[in-house]
Image (cartoon, rainbow, N blue to C red):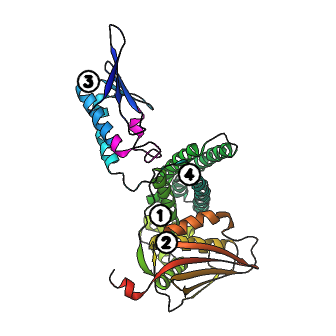
Amino acid sequence: MLHSAVVLLGDRDDLEIYHTPGHSPDSISLRVGSLLFVGDLFFAPNPGMAGAYGWSQQDLLDSIQKILWILENKKIILCCSGHGKPIDAQMARKTREVMYSDAASLQGLEEVTPQWAKRTAAYAQDLIIELERNFTIIAGRLAYIGHILNELEEQTEAEELESLLDSKVLDDLFADFYRFAMELKAGKKLDWEFVHKAGQTVGRLDRLLERKKLVSVIDQSLLNRMSRLLSDYSVTYRGFRPPYYVSYVDVNGLIGEVLEQVRHKPYDEEAILKTESQEDYLKALKARIAHVNLFEDVELSFQPDSDAPFARMDRERFSDALIDILERFAGAGLKKLKIATALNDDWVLVRIAGEGPASCHPLSQANRFFERNLALCGGLLQIILEADDPSVEIELYAFGEEETSWN
């Protein structure tokens, strides 16, 4: 049912008012002659809107159908949204059809409240700090590889690599975000605005990340972490919970795989010299230059508890988080790292400990980030500082063999 009211404008046209809730309960659309004004209805299924206070999925679906009827039956030529340029009626109809499909698919939404905005704003600030750190690592790696290639008189390859990431664009993006963060801290911006600002920044960073081209020179684990960081915020920004793929995992076996991965050398120096083509040679050479072995001078040891059963976790997320933690411990200058597992009642404990002095805990500046990251893996994180030997403990819910045999 389409409810409307008419306001007489004189001899020429009438103003027709339609109730089109969804974005908010009191949303309306206006028709004047062949023009249709739809307010923010175009944006109701979009990031930051779905699940907001007053937003209604069923009302939105109904209103999209109403707008489609108006476009078909009221001789509309142009459709004007609350944001952006007017579009013709044919394009508006196609947009509405896509919107209906998108809106109908929205499931598992978080309730977007002021508390959600405050919590997400805190998450956004931690996230951008992590993204800046990782983008800086990638930019530095590319600059180093480019420098070596120039020294080897491979200027074309060097220029191609250096073009994969525009450092000035990156610097401007992060500087703009931090200015916005200062305005939030000063009370000049709202949490909602900050959440949207972070969403815009993440979208631009995602477009800058040339994954397919970077994979030959940047560690796959780092690229996986970057992609997950960008994706998780995009999902959260839309009002959803990030995906969590639960499985029952042999913790000891998984840690063994991770240690093999961080020790792996992705090149063979003899094979570089035996390549049959210039293209293969340059590819192998770039992989050799790009490899940075953070654990070259680090003694890594693992003490598995044979009684530790399977644990409930997101395997991929946990692997990436564990590699990240180990790299930060090694980067802090700790020369001995020990991983141990233990069974404590219904929990499998994974302890990562470093030996040697450290000016501060390797995770002290990213405590909240890792707590959230490990929670998405299915674990609880505790940071421990004993004298000069920093460590962390991760607790994972344990499942015995009799509980996992049917999965």
Q: Position of residue 59 (x, y in %)?
A: 34, 41
Which mark is nearer the camera, 4 or 3? Answer: 4
Which image quarter holds the N terminus? top left
What residue appears at the point 64 percent right and 66 percent down from the top-left corner? 367
Crowding at label 2, few (<14), some or many (≥20) Cα neighbours within 10 Å?
many
Q: Position of residue 101 (x, y in %)?
A: 30, 46
Instruction: Give the CA distance from mark 4 to mark 3.
Output: 42 Å
Q: Position of residue 364 (x, y in %)?
A: 68, 67
**Tag 3–tag 1 contact (CB < 8 Å):** no
What residue appears at the point 31 percent right and 42 percent down from the top-left corner? 61
Label 4 sits on residue: 115
Label 2 sits on residue: 378
Would residue 30 appear left or right of 194 to someone viewing this image? Answer: left
Question: The magenta stretch spans which residues?
Answer: 39-59
**Local secondary structure at mark 3:** loop
User: What amino acid type is highlighted by mark number 1?
Assistant: Val
User: What amino acid type is highlighted by mark number 2?
Assistant: Gly
Instruction: Give the CA distance from mark 4 to mark 2.
Output: 23 Å
Label 1 sits on residue: 215
**Local secondary structure at mark 2:** loop
**Local secondary structure at mark 1:** loop
The rendered magenta stretch, by its main secondary structure, is classed as loop
